Image (cartoon, rainbow, N blue to C red):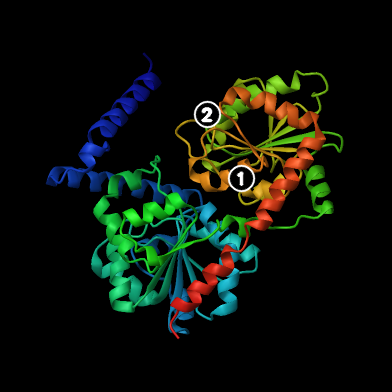
Amino acid sequence: MNRKGIFVFIKHLIKTFVMKYFLNPDVLDSTSALAVFIKRLCFKLILIRSHITNYRDRFYTVSDLSAIIGYIPLKTRRIINQSPGTILISALGFGEIINSISLIRGIQTISSYPIVIISRQPQLTRQLTQSMGLSVIALPYPYHFCVWRPFISYWLNTLRPVSILCIENMIELRADMLELAKTKHKTSVLLINAHAYRKSTFLWHILEETKDQNKRRFKCVDRAGAVSDEARKYLLGYGVPDSNIIMVNNLKFDTAKHIIKIEECERIRQQLGISRDAQVLICGSVHPGEEVILLNAFKDVIRRPGMENIRLIIAPRELYTLNPIITSIKSLGFSIVLKTASPRISRDSSAIIIVDTIGELKTIYSIADVVIVAGSMLDHLIGHNPIEPASLGKPVIAGPYMSSFNDVMDKFLHRKAMIQLQNTEELANQVAALLKHPEIRERMGSLAKAIVEECSGATAKYLDILGRLLPK
């Protein structure tokens, strides 16, 4: 066995040992001092690594690193000090940041409080909000390295939040932080787009999450917007009073609405080197391992008569997964070209276009004939947002594993405005059928777009609730 093989074996052995003895539910519920110490040590080590990675990948600036331990940059403090308080928005990742955009616009029309967004990707938040003409302050979550009460107290005393808005979940917000905000600053807490939590691979949740922590978190919630009956039952199970739960459509229906002009579509096709007569198949939010399923289906489709002129675009879910996905694609015999390639992308119809940028998927969806929403083809995944392509009137195919979007999928599937695979073997046939029959694509796309319009309006409801919670 060579060195690489030995290294892989040792890595696999350590991972198996940790997952079996430290991260399984039986150990997680243990109250022994050793179990608690090991869990918290692993938690901190993983987060230290994530901070280093975020800084390397330019998701953090130098000032963000200091903000992690609670220090708020002087420039930010000066802006905050001009107001009696702030509105704090907790948006875990890129998806939550995108989904909060319509809400941020609305908040700025009803309130003069500065908006502070805390997320795992503050630099990306700044770039995104600035590109949309929004004035917000972006900070990282402040208590990953140090969760001592004095640091949390200093952080809250500096920001003085009058209201905390949690987008979709409260995973990163510690219970003691919420309790301190409510008791000392009389802060209101609004949980937006709440859905029933399902087990995932988020290690920080597995390591730190306990029923006690969750109940303490939810006890702080003044109002919660539930997107489904399942979410409502979940909230009730953690002690949120029924009177504090409001049934609201998914906020993603509001965020997705965006008009893209024909001229813009033509510009994108030219930029990507796609001829006018070529059909376009786009796979969005692809996770490592899914590219094999997608490319095998693509191979099957392009071998069929009349299906030769199809361009495939793959958008990985995270940029750090680019290299393994590209390596896998090449091993299957395909050539690739990056969207950012220079000189401009080749018109070679056999080359697969890889989207190696962030925040452009919605615009790129506009040129699709068929969209496959990935993050749904493997059994450990929980799906991604199908509303974006649906809002553009595109026919959408999703995989079998869309548990994070059950409420959304039900609306589309009930009216046959979307296709959800029973198994991945169906993918090639479903793609071929849609590409072959424009009338089916048109019907599905029109229905999907109409459903997005009908289900909009969550932003107005949340703004009304927030207006009543803010200090008079």
Q: Amino acid at mark 1?
A: Pro
Regarding mark 1 in the picture, which secondary structure is present there? loop
Query: Could you tell me residue 150's position as x and y percent?
Result: 25, 70
Out of 107 and 332, give the one closest to the viewer: 107
Residue visible at 63% across and 44% down in the picture? 412
* Quadrant holding the N terminus: top left
Which quarter of the figure has residue 174?
bottom left
Task: Please report contact status of discs 1 and 2: CB closer than 8 Å, yes or no.
Answer: no
Residue 289 disc label: 2
Which of the pair 164/6 is nearer the observer? 164
Residue lying farthest to the right in this orientation = 277
Which of the two marks, 1 or 2, is nearer to us in this view? Answer: 1
At x 72%, y 50%, the residue is 392
Count the numbered circles shown.
2
Q: Amino acid at mark 2?
A: Gly
Q: Is residue 294 left or right of residue 230?
A: right
Q: Can residue 111 be seen at all in this image of the molecule?
A: yes
Position of the C terminus, as image quadrant, is bottom left
| Image location of residue 395, percent across then percent down | 71, 40
Under tag 2, what secondary structure?
Answer: loop
The residue at 81%/55% (across/down) is: 261
Instruction: Please state which of residues 155 and 364 is positioned toward the viewer in this rendering.
Output: 364
Among numbered discs 1 and 2, the one appearing first in the sequence = 2
* x then y, percent, for residue 267: 81, 49
Q: Quadrant of residue 435?
A: top right
Q: Residues within 10 Å of mark 2 (few under 14, many from 20)?
A: some
Q: CA distance from mark 1 to mark 2?
A: 20 Å
Mark 1, residue position: 386
